[in-house]
Image (cartoon, grey):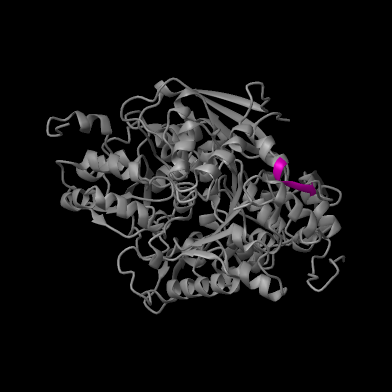
Amino acid sequence: MSEGTLYDAVWDRHRVRRLPSGQDQLFVGLHLIHEVTSPQAFGMLEERDLEVAYPERTHATVDHIVPTDDRERPYDDDAAESMMAKLEENVADAGLTFDHPDTGRQGIVHVIGPEQGLTQPGMTVVCGDSHTATHGAFGALAFGIGTSQIRDVFATGTVAMEKQAVRRIEVTGELGDGVTAKDLILTIIGELGTDGGVGYVYEYGGPAVESLSMPGRMTVCNMSIEGGARAGYVNPDETTYEWLSETDAFEASPGKFADRKGYWESIRSGDDATYDDVVTIDAAEIEPTVTWGTTPGQTVGVSEPVPAPETLPSDDRAVAERAQDHMGVEPGEPMAGFPVDVAFLGSCTNARLPDLRAAAEIVEGHEVADDVRGLVVPGSQRVKAAAEREGLDEAFRAAGFEWRGAGCSMCLGMNDDQLEGDEVCASSSNRNFVGRQGSADGRTILMSPEMVAAAAVTGEVTDVRELAAAPEVAR
Amino acid sequence: MSAPDGDDAVDAPAVERVTGTGVPVRGNDIDTDQIIPSRFLKVLTFEGLGEFAFFDQRYENTGPDADGGETAESPTDHPFNEEGFQDANVLVVNANFGCGSSREHAPQALQRWGIDAVVGESFAEIFAGNCLALGIPTVTAETEEIEALQDHVETHPDTEITVDVADERVSYADREIDAAVDPAQHQSLVAGEWDTTALLGSNPEQVAETAASLPYTDR
């Protein structure tokens, strides 16, 4: 078993007791909720005549069903309206803080927590959402839970969990130009597999991870679950503290910040920490990476050939054949040049300000290709406002993108933002599952925001490094 | 049967074994979006989700219709459509079943369709945890054993299968398979302690002490 890691330290600090099942009862430092997975849990509380035990540690937003165009109430979609109304009722009854769209703080749950400084190093963070691992970027122990567990956390402030093994993913070297945190995590999942992380928590480290910004680290941790790991984290450092010092939580409280920093430093994995497994990845080897199939582990460098199923390990062949049939990709051909119909820039993986800035830079001097629908969906109202202050909205609009309100949007198509028929989407989101983006025949190609921008303007999957080198881009 | 005492007592019967007929759903990496597509998550309760289990796999043409209902045309040969499997309660799957989203709607839909136990090569963690919270065992066995069971069930849908959680065995026809059950799942199911709310709520003072010991709970 691991020893001396951040995971061990945070686990021990939050452990209330050992349960008869052998699991531990863990105190929850931050419980984030949204409209999709919470209503049934509130319903169960009511049935059992229970109340939210730690309302001050519980924070709500609305993201999955919220429209990104016409946000006037009532929403056009009756189901969405009823979910929003239920959330409003539930949070009012329980006395919870709610980042309602009227507050200007609404956004995707994994964008707003870090943005406001709710997410802090050394905390346990849970949410009824598998991408909760995002918060691990701050050195928090963060994981997704189901609705029955949301009920547990509401009622008791705790959750029953089994301790996992820890795998250190050491990323050496430097990412090349045009290669991003998204390419790194897609490569990691491609190498370790979609179930490689089952039973593990991932600790991401090494020079290439340490040099990432907080949004970059969030992108990496966000997709831990796509590799089967329920949680992933990065040890906190000066980059983390700088981000936190500028959040609502600490901006006006230097004393509190200094106090907390002592704790944050104390929970970092020690130099002599023991891991259950260590995997090393060379950042310099990573190319802009895209998916060719229907699992996030089916990845390839954009210019490399799509693998033939018979060349893959036997367990992966049937899945690969079905995936290639669905996608219409040819083994042996590269993904570069594959035509796209939609470009989606958004989601909890890649819709923070630096993501939008980087994509806008690629778009500059170009226009969205004919017949391509380009959609930019900022991760939060604050991201949107900040982008607008920089004129990014104008840059995207001028190029022919739609500039939308904050929400999960086309990542999973629970609002009107959906693929139609067998459209192909160049997407900065996290899942390329069949049907994920709202159409059973829809096709998703995962990539970085920069690559989405490049695909939008050329109308096909494009190596962003080649586009940026083209003479019409004046840098 | 053992249920927690007190006002919030909930029926969480011990699940020592599940007996019934099987339904094979083949393929690795069957994700939660296939088990229940996200458009069916626009609900306030889990009621009625059973009919939408594997919905987009069960029909060639699906999607919301103009009246707020669902189009379902051209049924496929998905096992959940087949007459012989309609009364099955043991789902037999392959590797990494339930990967993806944390949506409890996935096991809720399966349970409401009629599934009481899942036997497979391996499961995604959040999915298995969500199953446990509903008293559904997720039992694993070797690939060859699972494939043999799937083959058998396909040709003999009436065969009775016993998923013995307590003894970690799956038996059918004249065969007996060694199966593995996660230790915490084993203990929780056999003891009837899989609904954890009462248990976790039984020591509020201790929880408050842990909370107070943390350096960030002073606001």
Could you say which is closer to the camera, residue A94 or residue A444? A94
User: Horizontally, is B20 left or right of A70 in the view?
Assistant: right
Task: Kindly give the residue lying farthest to the left in the view shown.
Answer: A472
Give coordinates of residue A393: x percent, y percent.
23, 52
Could you say which is closer to the camera, residue A220 or residue A32? A32
The stretch of residues the image draws in magenta is A13-17
Q: Quadrant of residue B60?
A: bottom left
Give coordinates of residue A275: x percent, y percent.
66, 27
- Residue B151 in the image: above or below residue A188: below
Q: Quadrant of the C terminus of chain A?
A: top left
Give coordinates of residue B33: x percent, y percent.
51, 56
Q: Is residue A15 magenta?
A: yes
Task: Kindly give the residue lying farthest to the bottom in the view shown.
Answer: B67
Tell me what residue is drawn at x 55 percent, y 38 percent.
A258
What main secondary structure does the magenta stretch of the protein show?
strand
User: Horizontally, is B132 left or right of B171 in the view?
Assistant: left
Any part of residue A196 in sight: no
- Residue A278 in the image: above or below residue B200: above
Tell me what residue is drawn at x 63 percent, y 33 percent.
A266
Any part of residue B123 in sight: yes
Q: Is residue A371 magenta?
A: no
Could you say which is closer to the camera, residue A268 or residue A448? A268
User: Horizontally, is A328 left or right of B116 in the view?
Assistant: left
Tell me what residue is drawn at x 74 percent, y 55 percent.
B208
User: Horizontally, is A191 left or right of B156 in the view?
Assistant: left
